[in-house]
Image (cartoon, rainbow, N blue to C red):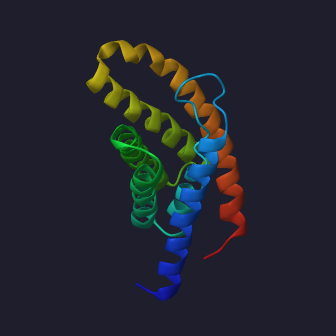
Amino acid sequence: MKTRKITVLAMAIALAMILSYVESLIPSPGIPGVKMGLANIVVVFCLYRLGWKEAAGVSLLRVFLVSLLFGHAASLMYSAAGAVLSLLGMIGLKATDRLGCVAVSVIGGVLHNVGQILIAWALMGPNVVYYLPVLIVSGTVTGVLIGVLAGLIVKRIKI
């Protein structure tokens, strides 16, 4: 791997971690589990500019490192499940080359929440599924916002 690419990936991981930390400082909108997903800006950018393997690496390393530094085992389980499902959906949708950053980000946001609900179901039982519609709406709204921002960055930054 070239030094330039390693440097870009290291900066992407660092930026994603910083965005995750900044997001943790933003008060919840009153709905448990609802977050913007600011680090996903970096993941979507990497998916479009560097490739799916690099985007997956950035996302998974960020989840692990943020959980290690600022979280706990439960946060790692929820974040990892959401990240893996989100990545699979975003990579699959991007591979079709039919839709842009916004649609890819929306599917990522929604699937991230689905992944977290699956873990909650496994730990707490099926009653948590009733919370899924709220998370789907929030994943869609935040996915649009993150997708628009990521799309602007993808257009302006060439690697």
Work out whether residue 107 or residue 146 is closer to the camera in this orientation and state it: 146
Give the quarter of the figure containing the N terminus. bottom left
Q: Residue furthest bottom?
A: 3
From the viewer's perspective, is residue 90 above or below residue 1?
Answer: above
Give the quarter of the figure containing the C terminus. bottom right
Q: Is residue 103 left or right of residue 95?
A: right
Work out whether residue 50 or residue 37 is closer to the camera in this orientation and state it: 37
Residue lying at 35% horizontally and 12% vertically, measured from the top left: 127
Residue 117 appears in the figure:
yes
Image quadrant in which you'd find residue 143: top right
Number of marks in the rendered image:
0
Residue 81 rendering spot, x and y as whole percentages: 35, 41
From the viewer's perspective, is residue 34 above or below residue 125?
Answer: below
Q: Is residue 91 left or right of residue 8?
A: left
Image quadrant in which you'd find residue 73: top left
Image quadrant in which you'd find residue 158: bottom right
Residue 100 appears in the figure:
no
Residue 80 rendering spot, x and y as whole percentages: 37, 45
Work out whether residue 72 or residue 79 is closer to the camera in this orientation and state it: 72
Residue 105 rendering spot, x and y as whole percentages: 56, 45
Residue lying at 52% horizontally and 25% vertically, measured from the top left: 135
Q: Is residue 123 left or right of residue 23?
A: left
Residue lying at 56% horizontally and 71% vertically, measured from the top left: 11
Residue 53 rendering spot, x and y as whole percentages: 39, 65
